[in-house]
Image: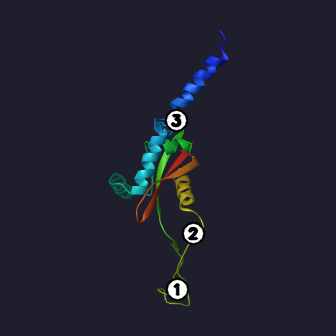
């Protein structure tokens, strides 16, 4: 039984117009709503996120976690909830790095300047996770939280 074009057109038009709310804006689906709430909590530095980051500071530098803290962002980064995918939370120190101290010629406290690492903190987190789990490949990573001293990334790894 073949459905007519007018039936198809009315169905698609219904779904198109159903995606708008009464004020003219788009209706958000579940993942968009989760992403938006997570972005707002990062932007506003909510108390919940501060407590969560405080707990993360006591964990090891690279820790395997059961579930991602932001499921929508993890899925957009390539995570699938099936065998062979894991999530690792990585703590990376913020700011510039200290140059190595000179061996000769100066006092140790002099001219020990900071310099940028030349690599982004996200890339440093991915390398740390790759070294911790050598039998997994790094798929992607995303920012999970930050405080004054550290940035926390969740790295998606695949077997």
Location of residue 133 with respect to 151 vertically, above or below: above
Q: Residue at x 65, y 9 (%)?
A: 1
Front position among marks 3 and 2: 2
Q: Is mark 1 on a helix, strand or loop?
A: loop
Q: Classify 10 Å Cα crowding around label 3: few (below 14), some (14-19), many (20 and above).
A: few
Q: Is residue 57 left or right of residue 140?
A: left
Q: What element carries label 3?
A: loop
| Residue 62 point in image, percent of width and height | 46, 54
The residue tagged 2 is 117
Q: How is the image coloured?
A: rainbow
Disc 3 and disc 2 in contact, CB within 8 angstroms:
no
Q: Residue furthest front?
A: 23
Front position among marks 1 and 3: 1
| Residue 119 point in image, percent of width and height | 59, 64
Residue in front for this viewpoint, 16 or 135: 16
Residue in front for this viewpoint, 56 or 60: 56
* Count of marks overlaid on the render: 3
Splitting the image into 4 quarters, where does residue 123 fall? bottom right
The residue tagged 1 is 111
Q: Is mark 2 on a helix, strand or loop?
A: loop
Dot 1 or dot 3, earlier in sequence:
3
Q: Residue at x 36, y 54 (%)?
A: 46
* Label 3 – label 2 distance at C-alpha: 35 Å
Q: Is residue 60 left or right of residue 83?
A: left
Dot 1 or dot 2, earlier in sequence:
1
């Amino acid at each position: 039984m073949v459905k007519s074009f007018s039936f198809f057109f009315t169905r698609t038009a219904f779904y198109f117009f159903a995606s708008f709310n009464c004020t003219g804006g788009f209706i958000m689906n579940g993942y968009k709503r989760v992403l938006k709430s997570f972005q707002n909590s990062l932007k506003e530095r909510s108390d919940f996120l501060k407590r969560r980051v405080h707990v993360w500071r006591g964990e090891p530098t690279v820790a395997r976690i059961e579930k991602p803290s932001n499921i929508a962002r993890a899925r957009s980064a390539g995570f699938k909830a099936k065998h062979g995918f894991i999530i690792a939370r990585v703590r990376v120190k913020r700011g510039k790095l200290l140059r190595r101290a000179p061996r000769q010629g100066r006092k140790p406290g002099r001219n020990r300047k900071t310099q940028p690492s030349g690599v982004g903190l996200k890339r440093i987190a991915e390398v740390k996770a790759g070294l911790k789990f050598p039998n997994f490949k790094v798929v992607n990573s995303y920012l999970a939280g930050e405080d004054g001293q550290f940035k926390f990334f969740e790295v998606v790894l695949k077997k």
